[in-house]
Amino acid sequence: MKRKRLLIAFILLAQLQLQAQVKLPLLHDSLFSTYYHQRVTLFESMPQTTLRQAQGEIIFLGNSITDGSEWAQLFNDVRMKNHGISGDITAGMLHRLDAVINRKPAKIFLLIGTNDLARNISADSVLKNMLLIADYVKQQSPKTKLYVQSILPVNELYGKFGGHTKNTILIQQVNEQLKANAAAHHYQYVDLHTPFSNENGKLKPELSNDGLHLMGNAYLLWKHILYPYVYDLQPKASLIPQPQQVQWKAGAFALYNCKTIILKDKSLLKEATQLQQYLQSMGWEMKLTDKAAANELFIELSLGNVKATQHESEAYQLDVSTSSVKLVANTAHGIFNGMQTLKQLLRSETTMDAVSITDWPAFSWRGYMIDVGRNYMSMPLLKQQIDVMAANKLNIFHFHATEDIAWRIASKHYPQLTAPEHMLRNKGMYYSEAEIKELINYCKERHITFIPEIDMPGHSAAFKRAMKTDMQSDSRLAIVKNILKEFCTTYDVPYIHIGADEVKITNKNFVPEVTAFIESMGKKVIGWQPGGNFSNSTIRQLWMDDNAHHTSNNQIQFIDSRHLYLNHMDPLEAVTTIFNRKIADKEKGDATTLGGTICMWHDRAVGKEEDVLNMNPVYPSILAFAERSWQGGGVDGWVANIGEPNTARANAFAAFEKRLLDQKQQYYSSLSFPYTQQSNLVWKLFGPFDNKGDLSKQFTPEQKGFDADKTKQAIEQVGATVVLRHWWAPLIKAAIPNAEDSTTWYAVTKIWSDEDETKQFWIGFNNLSRSPATDAPPANAWDAKQSAVWVNGQLIPAPQWKHAGQKGNSELPLADEGYEYRMPTNIPLKKGWNTVLIKAPVGSFKGKDWQNPVKWMFTFAPVQF
């Protein structure tokens, strides 16, 4: 009897599952036109896109309105496929849906229904068929994202297509139901009706010449609306740095209808020309003039009186309406800043959403430093970094050009300084007078101050090799002054950075004499603090010292670079740390607190120059620093993690990360940008377990049956990289307060997958700094601490390191030691939730030597390309 009941229950369950399966209706081919079949056979015969295939095709599915566009050309993206068929109805869509789904597209944009209504097919039937399409797509291709677009408005003004243009009310009814059913049927509803409608709910006459089909300008508007859905962006343009005051408004400015840039002040000709050339690169020809014709759309640049709480010389106001774009500032620099915001608003390259912005920086000094003394970098790569700086409103380019390894500034009087035999790396590679002038001018065009650093008297072994003696001798001090005179009279720069750190001062007069000499040449002096015996007129760049004694001295100006060395940071940690950082421990700058500079010191040799950007989080960090140094604010103290979930700190970071990822998608797809989403990961940390120095010792979380959801956890942390104890503790706060050595901690999180599949992950436990000569990981292990990771109970093996067990060597380029520059780890996932378990043991916090500090951290991140 029991077996019979079980059999009946099984049959009933199978019947319910069968009923739950979505099936398409069987329709005869004769129901559809010759053109319909021509198009369908074309679609079926087309091969899959090979370029960017990993990202999948994006299919536009619809009737003649979809058929009428060149989608790939419109978006400049070969993934776009036009599967529109003129005259098609929802039944025709169902009939050909399998051919679409079999391609497993990444996205489908569906627009259908107006022809159904014109054929007197009821609104209920149209809705039923569209929901059937949505359900079938979800069932057959769960990873495909479906976007159901509202039926477009119509207009009887032209006296054409009467069967269509009479259906204004029905169209609105169907659209209301499509919007209401979106969540239940797993699609994203996209409202095209509102922006395409006039005040009477009719298709805007300027968008059509027959009341149904679209003109070219309508497709450009359509692109603007779809752009964030196509590229998974925020609804409004993601601005970095976020302006101080932003008010979004209704409507948009149609760039494609604009032909004029009004120049109100001739002193802005350089900026106006730059904007003109930028728009021209998009295909939009603009004329420069002093006024616009009546009823003509225009962009206007002018000088005015912009009020700001500080740094008014860089402030601007930007007002975008449906009829104009007006940019006003107090200076040309302010206009340039506003232009960078304007460019970001133009993400679709056709239209800008209406907005009013008033903006100014919190800090006047927003810098980026690159060390070319240790590793030479070509002019194109330097310019690339300057362009990224300018786009994000950084205004200081710190050029560290001389080092122990090489002197890379040409000298007419002392050519031996740049002789190949006196260089240890990139021998014979240096910057000529013409190249340095080119860099200075390149910066000036972008309102960036070029700051050369000629390091003295420390970090000057290259000088000693060339000149056969130490800088601090009296005879060589005279040579130093000659070099400085040559530099100051040759190059138009306001500052000279003399370094003066990490050196034993044997001549107490060296730094004061050099400082006085440079100042006599009309330049300001900058030096590293802690460093030499500076005068009060020297601007101090803090690299380790606390700034408390400077803030109490109103005569000393300073720049904050403490814990802002990118070469010491894990890529994901870097963005977190910099975003949370309160620059100089202040909300905003003042007369002595100028701002900050992030620094890129890649001490180790590189295989190729691009590795400096591949192995360090340069561009993600520039964006994070641009946000913080422009916006001001930040978190008290120095923190290395995002923090606990649902806190103000974690929520603020998540909001910024959305904008950061948008920018990565839009502007950095062809550049090195080692960052992936991490604010969506929450870890439960369990510990401490006393391992008594035995790093292999196993504890409860490794045992079968351990359930993290039913176990009281000590700590929750957000992020793909979690620093358990920072190697500069207690200065920098990490996840575990009062961490103890000889302990083991575990971390658990869960990752969802729509289907059984293999995904790529970044995994790491000891992100090597690119400065110390750190030893490579041992063979067959993630690190020297016996860290481990399991996914669904399966141990994930460590990579086969190219230099396994290699003793650290600054002249041996890194190869695969960092997750951000090696191939990601492929891990099979099951459909549903997947459990990730991290084991992080530690012995002593005292490292083997200063080259091998103990970094107690882990990274586990799904990679999004």
Image (cartoon, rainbow, N blue to C red):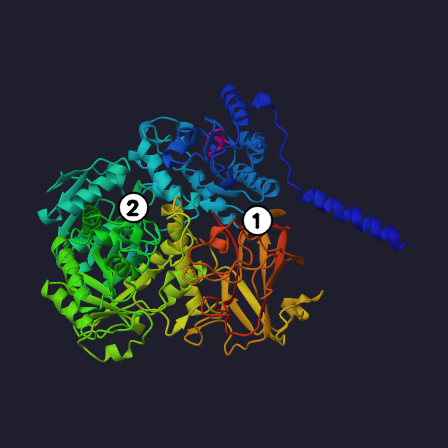
In the rendered view, would you say 69 is above or below 599?
above
- Residue 334: x percent and y percent? 19, 56
Q: Which residue is mark 2?
A: 352
Along the viewing direction, whichever of 137 and 734 lies nearer the viewer: 734
| Residue located 25% across and 55% down the image | 356
Along the viewing direction, whichever of 251 and 535 lies nearer the viewer: 535
- Residue 589: x percent and y percent? 24, 69
Q: Amino acid at mark 2?
A: Met
Task: Please provide the residue range marked out in magenta.
Answer: 112-120
Along the viewing direction, whichever of 583 and 15 lies nearer the viewer: 583
**Is 464 in the magenta?**
no
Q: Nearer the viewer, mark 1 or mark 2?
A: 1
| Residue located 48% across and 51% down the image | 815
In the rendered view, would you say 56 is above or below 353?
above
- Residue 190: x percent and y percent? 44, 44
Neighbor class of circle 1 (other Cα within 10 Å; few <14, some 14-19, many 20+) is some
Q: Relative to 261, is 281 on the left or the right?
A: right
Q: Amino acid at mark 1?
A: Lys
Quarter holding residue 632: bottom left
Q: Is residue 663 visible?
A: yes
The dot on residue 759 is: 1
Q: Relative to 566, is 860 on the left or the right?
A: right
Residue extending farthest front: 468
| Residue located 64% across and 51% down the image | 830
In the rendered view, would you say 383 is above or below 104?
below
The dot on residue 202 is: none
- Secondary structure type for disc 2: strand
Q: Label 1, label 2: how many angstroms apart (C-alpha)?
A: 36 Å
**Is the C-beta separation of discs 1 and 2 under 8 Å?**
no
- Residue 804: x percent and y percent? 55, 56
**Is 113 in the magenta?**
yes
